[in-house]
Structure formats: C-alpha cells, structure tokens
Image (spheres, rainbow, N blue to C red):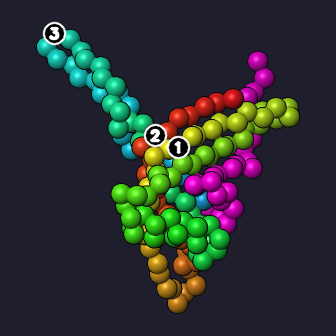
Amino acid sequence: MPNQVSLTGNDTIIIGGQLMTDFAFGVVCEINFPTDLVQVHRGNNGNTTFALNNHGFQSEVKLRILLGRKNDSFLNSLMVAMQNNFAGFTLINGVFVKNVGDGANNITPVTYIMSGGVLKRNPNAMSDADGNPAQSLAEWDLIFANNDRQVG
C-alpha cells in the first residue's frame, strides 16, 4: 500500500451567511469541542454505565480576522443586535469546509455545520509601540449549540 497523504487548503468559512475572507496570519479559524460527548462511570464489580452527554455537541469557534475590515464590521453588527435585543436575536449558523486532497487530484470535503450560535464576548484590543502585528487583529469567539461533522 502506498503512503497516504493529506493536502489541505482553500478552506471555506461562512458565519451568519457571510463568507469570511478578511483573515490575518497564523491560525485564522479554530473549532473546539470543550466537553466530552460520552460520560463513562465504572462502579462496583466492574459494572459500567455509558451516557451520551448532550453538552458534547457544543462547539466553540475562534476567528482571527483583520481589525476594522468587512468581516469585523459584520460580526460587530451581530454583537450590537444581540446586545440590543437578546430575546429577539436570531441565532447564528456557520459552516466550515476543509478541502483535503490525496495527491492524485481527488478532494474530500470535511464539513462542520454549526447552528444555534451566539457571540461569546467582544474582541480584545491592544496598542503596542513595538509594532506587534496582533494589534491589527479582531479575535471573535462564538459558541454553537449544535455541530455536525461530515466527511465526503
């Protein structure tokens, strides 16, 4: 069997119907699952219980985008709308598609479909006289109630 390869690039990220394109440097999007999907408890005599933990479907998303650009402005407008009328806020949906190539011109999409999202906090800000490039970033944190992962 030949060696397997995984070529990635040309990822697509859509938040609230808006294509995210104003990315900075380094890791520009990260999806994390902070809670285990299953809880396992071992009891007396080796008896074990397994339970689906619905919190495990939640995902946290961090976006690192250019400060003051179109995507930053869009996310800020969502934050303002959420703060002004939280009960009436329309929850955010998101899609993250990572395209994976096999080195033989075959591409398999790995897709995360997120729903029930809100913005967790306002992005931090800094001013750095030493020229730290991170001062030109807006780091947005979102949390989604549901996340479905599909391969292919």
Left/right of residue 6 with respect to residue 147 in the rendered view: right
Instruction: Name the residue at 58% across, 40% down.
Output: 112
Mark 2 or mark 3: whose residue is earlier in sequence: 3
**Within-10-Å neighbours for mark 3: few <14, some 14–19, many 20+:** few
Q: Which stretch appears magenta?
A: 1-26
Q: Is residue 23 inside the magenta stretch?
A: yes
Q: Are marks 2 and 3 in contact (CB under 8 Å)?
A: no
| Residue that carries the numbered disc 3 in the rendered image | 45
The kind of residue on which mark 2 rests is Asn
Mark 1 or mark 2: whose residue is earlier in sequence: 1
Q: Which mark is residue 114?
A: 1
Where residue 129 appears, as percent x and y from the top left, is: 52, 90
Comparing 113 with 41, the one in front is: 113
- Single out the mark in the foreground, 1 or 3: 1
Tell me the quarter of the picture where residue 108 sits: top right
The kind of residue on which mark 3 rests is Asn
- Single out the mark in the foreground, 2 or 3: 2
Picture quarter with the N terminus: top right
Distance in Å between CA atoms under marks 1 and 2 = 6 Å
Mark 2 element type: strand
Pick out the residue farthest to the left: 44
Mark 1 or mark 3: whose residue is earlier in sequence: 3
